[in-house]
Image: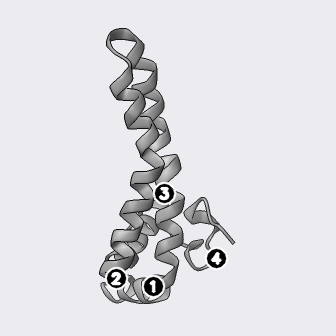
Amino acid sequence: MFVFFSSQINALKHLKIRDRQVVIAISLSMLSPVNKVLLRIIKLLLLSPLFLIFAVFEGWLLIPFLLLGGLCYPLLTTPIEINFAKKHLSEALTQYNTKGA
């Protein structure tokens, strides 16, 4: 199942949003180099059309696309990061709990 929000993950439901973000960041840091590169390539492919739009428009016409890009960036990239982070989520949660958070 594709997860769009960290609150949809049962193992993280008991945590506050900032704590969920920390656990996901720990989990992402545990990814293998190949998976890290793959994650970055997927994010780049999703954001490329937006960057092409930035190159085409000039002046005041660019402002709505900049706002759209600022809003869409986390909406596009966060679900992908969460789904990559699910591989090491239990290890990251254990590491987070042992740090005394």
The residues tagged by marks 1 and 2 sit, at their Cα atoms, a distance apart of 7 Å
Q: Secondary structure at mark 3?
A: helix
Label 1 with label 2: CB-CB less than 8 Å: yes
Q: Earlier in the sequence, mark 3 or mark 2?
A: 2
In the image, residue 53 above or below residue 49: above
Q: Where is mark 4, residue-wise?
A: 10
Amino acid type, callout 3:
Thr
Q: Earlier in the sequence, mark 1 or mark 4?
A: 4
Q: Quick one: label 2, few (<14), some, or many (20+) residues within 10 Å?
A: some
Q: Which mark is residue 30?
A: 2
Q: Where is mark 1, residue-wise?
A: 88
Name the residue rendered at 52%, 78% in the picture. 86
Amino acid type, callout 1:
His
Amino acid type, callout 2:
Met
Name the residue rendered at 33%, 70% in the picture. 37
Q: Earlier in the sequence, mark 1 or mark 3?
A: 3
Q: Where is mark 3, residue-wise?
A: 78
Q: Earlier in the sequence, mark 1 or mark 2?
A: 2
Residue 69, percent from left and from top: 44, 34
Residue 16 in sight: no
The residues tagged by marks 3 and 2 sit, at their Cα atoms, a distance apart of 17 Å
Q: Secondary structure at mark 1?
A: helix
Label 2 with label 4: CB-CB less than 8 Å: no
In the image, residue 8 above or below residue 86: above
Q: Nearer the viewer, residue 86 or 38?
A: 38
